[in-house]
Image (cartoon, helix red, strand yellow):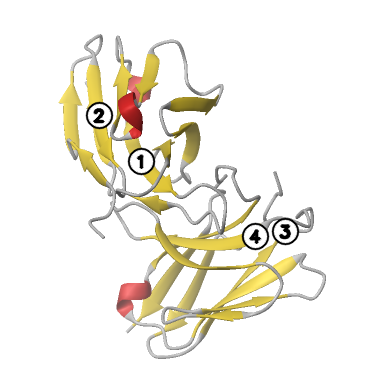
Amino acid sequence: DTGVSQDPRHKITKRGQNVTFRCDPISEHNRLYWYRQTLGQGPEFLTYFQNEAQLEKSRLLSDRFSAERPKGSFSTLEIQRTEQGDSAMYLCASSLRGGRNTIYFGEGSWLTVV
Amino acid sequence: DAKTTQPNSMESNEEEPVHLPCNHSTISGTDYIHWYRQLPSQGPEYVIHGLTSNVNNRMASLAIAEDRKSSTLILHRATLRDAAVYYCIPSNTGNQFYFGTGTSLTVIP
């Protein structure tokens, strides 16, 4: 079990630039989730996929955010025209559909917009 | 989504038991009760979960009230590595989790 891996772990970008984060889930997991966490707050749900289908998006996910999961394996989260308010940790998680629905998280990708 | 109430912070002496409470009075009949913890600068880590019966694993025990409106995470002997934010999350199978602000546990040497 190699766990959920995220890349890059840290990203500093200038306001207005685009950034992309990658997530590789646990290999047999067909559900993949993206969360965002700001300092002092718990993680907030953004979106999730079952295989390649994006089944739900939070209203937190503005039009500048897009997530994909081609072929139902890895996923990318792109943020266009970054703003300072986008500075946060972006967490990816994966799980098996149904059952006990235990979600396993990656270490997160820290974004700082300057 | 079931709302949860947890203390903002708790302290424990090292090697003593810790009882972390959570109220989830609006929990639905199909919600599992999950507990996760998050160490500084890391992603949340699964601790334990249960539905109705008390549960034990190598990390902790979970005591669930008979009416399921509250639960308690029990760390039998707190260590310095247990210092973290602990989240209680009632969740339907198949749905995403909604975290609150959790309980920040400080372990005193």
Label 3 is placed on what type of residue?
His
Q: Which residue carries the number 2 mark? A: A21
Whether labels 3 and 2 belong to a single chain: the reply is no
* Distance from Cα at disc 3 to Cα at disc 2: 34 Å
* Mark 2 neighbour class, 10 Å CA radius: few under 14, some 14 to 19, many 20 or more: many
Chain ID for label 1?
A
Residue B37 located left or right of residue A110: right
> What's the amino acid at mark 4?
Tyr
- Residue B108 image offset from top left, x and y in percent: 37, 80
Which residue corresponds to mark 4?
Answer: B32
Note whether residue B63 is visible: yes
Q: Earlier in the sequence, mark 3 or mark 4?
A: 3
Question: Mark 3 — residue?
Answer: B24
Residue at the spot of label 1:
A92
Given residues B41 and A94, the one toward you in this image is A94
Mark 2 falls on what kind of element?
A: strand
SS class, disc 3: loop
Give the mark nearer the N terminus: 2 vs 1. Answer: 2
Q: Are dots 2 and 1 in contact, CB under 8 Å?
A: yes
Asked whether, in this view, residue B87 is left or right of residue A104, the answer is: right
